[in-house]
Image (spheres, rainbow, N blue to C red):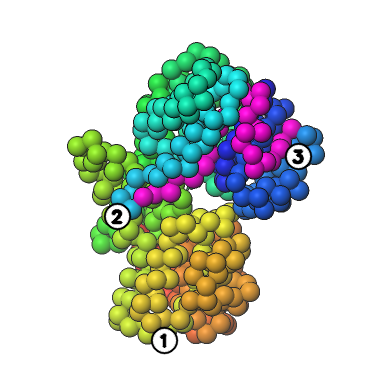
Amino acid sequence: MKISVVGTGYVGLVTGTCFAETGVTVTCVDIDKDKVQDLRQGIIPIYEPGLEPMVKNNVDKNRLFFTTSLQESLKDTDAVFIAVGTPPDEDGSADLQYVLDVAREVGEHMENYMVVVTKSTVPIGTAEKVRKTLKEALDKRGVNIDFDVASNPEFLKEGDAIDDFLKPDRIVIGTDSAKAEDILSRLYKPFVLNGHPVISMDIPSAELTKYAANSMLATKISFMNDIANLCELVGADVNSVRRGIGSDSRIGNKFIYAGTGYGGSCFPKDVKALINTSDKNNHSLDILKAVESVNERQKTTLVNKLMYHFNNDLKGKKIALWGLSFKPHTDDMREAPALSIIEKLRAEGAEITGYDPVAMEESKRRIGDSIQYARDQYEALVDADALLLVTEWPEFRTPNYNVMKKLMKNHLIMDGRNIYELSEMKNQGFIYYSIGRKA
Ligand code: UGA
């Protein structure tokens, strides 16, 4: 089989590379010449464990190609996956310009039947817009070539993307054509041999499934964060509550960890977009509005605790931040709680030194030298009045407490991810605040 994947961002690159791994001939298309040049040599623009060697391997085996020409990629292709960005508009709805540009260009150049698949997270109704845009381009050419559209949302997690793609919990395919369903089922067959299902449905349901999945996960997190806030007021421990409820298989023990709020390029954007879709349909998704506002509040909960500790005066206080990315194993800082924390700390006049195992360059790109950067996690602690643990990177889990105490001016830890044991902190003599646990 032969496919094209348009957009070599996170989703496109992982999708193209994993399909190539199964022997499919894949051409990835991007408008960025430099990026394409790099990718041809196996240099990848993102940090994703395991992806680089896989790209190199498939390029070497002549089944993964990169080009700036969508037209060139379309020759004899069975399916075109659209995986370009859908940045949020000011009102929170996704901007479909890039998706529809691809649809138009496909219509301008296609010569054979193909299924055009939306892979980016797109609002309900987008596949129909893709169909209409493509058809208009064909009509302009005065040709009548058969094609289908489909929605095939992805459920990859950054940092685990390869594994999630190769061993998916499920594949969702939304289409109204048996031919398109057959092509997509054949493409995905190697990944679902271990019993995980392909779930076929109509197009709007597939489009909504993606938003509903992310919104449900975000809801779990905000719910636990708010329960954690209550725990602090009534003297309960959110970890015990989590274990207590998570052992009920109807609730499940995943995605119920309290923390400094969810971030990243997906949950915040998708929750907003679903609220927006709902509002446009004269339905108020109140539950998601609450999820969003709880999350906004949660992102600065560590700073509030710090203010409380220092009697509302953070002026000139030296604060160390461990972790800048929105979660471990990625350099992604989009909507990262660290950004809200830094903004609030700076507004209060604190001096910040940050350290992150991989996101330092990304941080410099985003916020420049508005904070200082340390070469390692301990250097960040020199003369610090407090340590704020923002991202639970593995190397922060068992630090050398003696070294920490020697370096820090104040032995104060604000743990935004509950990674340290209360008893250990007490034994080590730290003043310790965490989320939803007794201080
Ligand atoms: C998320 C979904 O998990 C994927 O299934 C989906 O495909 C993806 O969005 C997407 O739409 O593209 P991702 O954004 O990579 O993936 O990150 P997650 O691992 O889901 O974490 C999201 C946020 O939730 C992080 O900030 C994390 O720290 C937070 N989180 C997660 C918690 O605060 N508590 C938890 O128990 C779990």
Position of residue 237 relative to residue 52, above or below, is: below
Q: Mark 3 near mark 1, Cβ–Cβ under 8 Å? A: no
Position of residue 106 relative to residue 240, above or below, is: above
Query: Within 10 Å of the Cα at label 1, are there few (<14), some (14-19), or many (20+) other Cα atoms?
Result: few
- Identity, as a three-letter code, of the amino acid under mark 2: Val
Q: Position of residue 39 (x, y in %)?
A: 70, 47
- In the rendered image, which residue does mark 1 sit on? 316
- In the rendered image, which residue does mark 3 sit on? 59
- In the rendered image, which residue does mark 2 sit on? 294
Residue drawn 36% across and 50% down?
A: 89
Query: Within 10 Å of the Cα at label 3, are there few (<14), some (14-19), or many (20+) other Cα atoms?
Result: many
Q: Secondary structure at mark 1?
A: loop
Determine if residue 311 is in view: yes
The span picked out in magenta is 63-89
Q: Quadrant of the C terminus?
A: bottom left
Question: Residue most toward the top?
Answer: 178
- Cα–Cα span, label 2 and label 1: 29 Å
Residue drawn 21% across and 37% down?
A: 283
Earlier residue among tags 3 and 1? 3
Q: Is mark 3 within 8 Å of ligand 1?
A: no
Q: Secondary structure at mark 3?
A: helix
Q: Secondary structure at mark 2?
A: helix
In this view, the mark in front (3 or 2): 3
Q: In the image, is residue 412 part of the stretch drawn in magenta?
A: no
Residue drawn 45% across and 81% down?
A: 351
Q: Quadrant of the N terminus?
A: top right
In this view, the mark in front (3 or 1): 3
- Cα–Cα span, label 3 and label 1: 52 Å
